[in-house]
Image (cartoon, coloured by chain):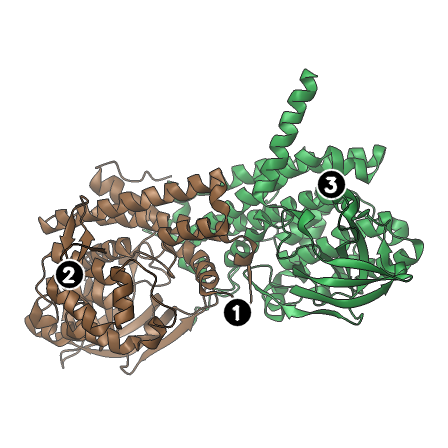
Chain colours: A brown, B green
Amino acid sequence: VTMNPGSRPHVDHSEGRLVAVPDDVVDWLARELPESWFAAVVDGRAIPDGVRESVDTNILLRRLGEAGFVVPDWPAEYGGRNASPEEARIILETLRRFHVPHPDDFVGVNLAGPTLLAWGTDEQRRRFLPAIAQRTKRWCQLFSEPGAGSDLAALTTKARLGDDQVWIVSGQKVWTSLAHNADLGILLARTEPDQPKHLGLSYFVVDMKAQGVDVRPLRQISGESHFCEVFLDEVRIRDDCRVGPRGHGWEVTLTTLMNERVGLSMVPEVHHVTVDRLVAAAMNSGDWSRPVLRDRVLRLLERDRVLGLTNMRAAELRRAGSEGPDGSLLKLAQSVLSRDIAYAAIDVLGVPGMAWSGAEPGDVEATRLAFLYAPAHTIAGGTSEIQRNIIAERLLGLPREPRS
Amino acid sequence: MRKSTSHRQEVFARPVEPHTWLEGIETPAESALRAEVRDFAWTHLESERNAMEEALRCSKYLPLLAERGYLGTLVAPEHGGAGLGLGASVVIAQELGGVVPSLAAMRAVCGNFVAKPLEEFGTAEQIKEYLAPLMRGECTTALAISEPDAGSDVSGLATSAARDGDGWILNGYKHHISGGAESRFMLVYAVTAQNASPSERFTAFLVPTDAPGVDASDEESTMGVRGLSHARVRFDDVRIDDWFRLGDVGEALRIMFFGLAAERIDIAARALGCATRSLEEARAFAAHRNQFGRPIRSFQAVSHKIADMRTRIDAGRLLVLRAARLYDQVLASEGPERASELCNAESSIAKLFCAEQGFWVCDQAMQVFGGRGYEHGSVVEVMFRDSRVFRFGGGTDEIQRHIIQRDEFARLFAARG
């Protein structure tokens, strides 16, 4: 964020131009953030100690939703601000630079919302979208199964339609992020068992509190439990919660997956470990004088900036109507970069990154978690191998995988 | 409906499947030992891996190792060891490391890192008091070197030992001391001549952990190798008799360097153990797991990973074997100190390669498993966490590179006269 002579904040544009942040965004920030917080960011200073902690994050996030800043490019009637993609980018970038907390509903904002905008009925959009924008409902994605990971269309969760126009769903999902905190889920199930696997699927919204939904958190490598296995035992879903045509759930799912890849490629940080923080940590540690480390960190910085520019270019293409597999390219690049940043961060930290008491400064804990999360970057949301297949076959037109 | 998928402790590899690719290179005795240790580890320890992590302790299994001669492999039989040499020791380290990395680490500390200097530099009384029970697995020990300001650069050690009549008073603080909290005694390096050169500045002591002023109760919580403690140790006016001094005054650096080469080779072997097990799990899972109507091993993206993993492990095994054989040869003809000196570069090469590539292999194995391998308690998850420490424990990658390049230039300049 930069101040111009008129004292209005600007952000860097993709070509290095300074673009004025809309007045209403600045006004909102000035109104909702503590004065010292706002002034520190505008002046390029660190936010004074204790100021961030003095703010009730939940209230701030609620106000963010009420202002339409969670999803600025959505229609206003669904909780957005009718912003163009470029305006939305500037708004989100400004919020990020002002260290406004992120809404913690990746699936709702990035997956369910865009899918409902593309495939939902007017009634479904009115019913579900404002609650995402206002952060009153949180979502999870019930796609993967024990036997259907990379090969998602092989899933076996079944849904049959009863005479009362209610679907009865039974099956098992796994690696469902934050299912234990979710109110709603997007669910893919087999409704036409006689059809080829990609044609016999339908897409639903399921109430995670419904009878028959059993969520069991799984413990992951870091010791945390962010993902779960979910058992669906004769769960009843009304037909008006089916999204898109019956039997065409795969097409709806492709919209979700494309948005997931794009969303994952946009995630600027994991556990607050970014390349900029990595640079700062290396400089503060005294390791900056080591040419090998400096070279490694600067290569990561270079990749980060190139990816940022590529993301902008992809956003422009999407605005022009392109909905191709470029999301795979971005997801692949981002996931490998995020992993490499996390691995470099643990190297900069050295031994304290391996041994900790929980009493160390937040950055040590964040780096440890980022390191343990690192392998998940190239697995979750479609493995790097799957992304490379999509790039090879659909973007470059190369032959399909030979059978061995 | 049936609700079962807890993937915890799922094991895909089998102990009887081909795992060693050095036929014709390893001796028949080494191959037989490998099969024996592997069978023992899978039979008695495989099912205990996660329990050791939960308990944060593994020392109760040391007597099992001792009974079979797997504990003090380098220590002479008259002192309770097996006297088999490093070639045999690395086979044990690899096979244990692929089943219970924590126990392999504890074995290294007790049976090698402390036991060998104690055997070499200890008095008859010290050997009787400490080495004998150590070799029976009746007690454990720890190596207390690292301090907040002395890691790669040991010359920065600040823990001091001051003369007090016929004894010493120790003061200082050590951290990252593996096995420290459960140890009966520690091998402690302390400054005894602050103004002397580093080679004469330090003295080694065997410090009983129940001595007044020793506090090893502050345990660090670590990312990996969680089956033993990693302690912060305080020494507050700890008074010990001169009897507890190991070696001569000012001789600690010599004691430290005496064991370094064997230590690095042992670490390389344990890194290979984690990597080999990760490969075995990934190989079995890739043959078992079907996606898109066929086993995922039939996809080149997966099968080529398996090929790359094996290639790197094979290379690592050869480097470890070379270093261990060289060490044993010099050990037999010129003694342990000279063995460490002449194996300096070879041991660093083995450690650097196995630590870096071992972690890479574990990372790739998790990628083959996908979400299933990311779950806490899965074998590849344990190996991933446990293999990271090898890249700095016993000397960082960067220090190994420094040693290797120094050796390389020394050879060049020696040849040029």
On the question of residue B369 being in view, the answer is yes
Instruction: Name which quarter of the figure residue A367 lies in.
Output: bottom left
Within-10-Å neighbours for mark 3: few <14, some 14–19, many 20+ = many
Q: Amino acid at mark 3?
A: Gly
How far apart are the alpha carbons under marks 2 and 3? 62 Å
Identify the residue at horizontal 42%, vertical 58% (top origin). Answer: A370
Image location of residue A59, percent across then percent down: 25, 78
- Chain of the residue under the numbered disc 2 shown in the image: A
Residue holding disc 1: A359
| Closer to viewer: mark 3 or mark 1 | 1
Identify the residue at horizontal 21%, vertical 37% (top origin). Answer: A397
Q: Amino acid at mark 1?
A: Ala
- Chain of the residue under the numbered disc 1 shown in the image: A
Are tags 2 and 3 found on a single chain?
no
Residue holding disc 3: B87
The N terminus of chain A: image quadrant:
bottom left
How far apart are the alpha carbons under marks 3 and 1? 42 Å
| Closer to viewer: mark 2 or mark 3 | 3
Q: Is residue B272 left or right of residue A211?
A: right
Dot 2 or dot 1, earlier in sequence: 2
Nearest to the observer: residue B19 or residue B220: B220
Residue holding disc 2: A248
Q: Please tell me whether residue B375 is drawn above or below residue A34 in the rendered image.
A: above
Q: Secondary structure at mark 1?
A: loop
Identify the residue at horizontal 52%, vertical 69% (top origin). Answer: A359
Q: Secondary structure at mark 3?
A: helix
Image location of residue B146, percent across then percent down: 66, 55
How far apart are the alpha carbons under marks 2 and 1? 52 Å
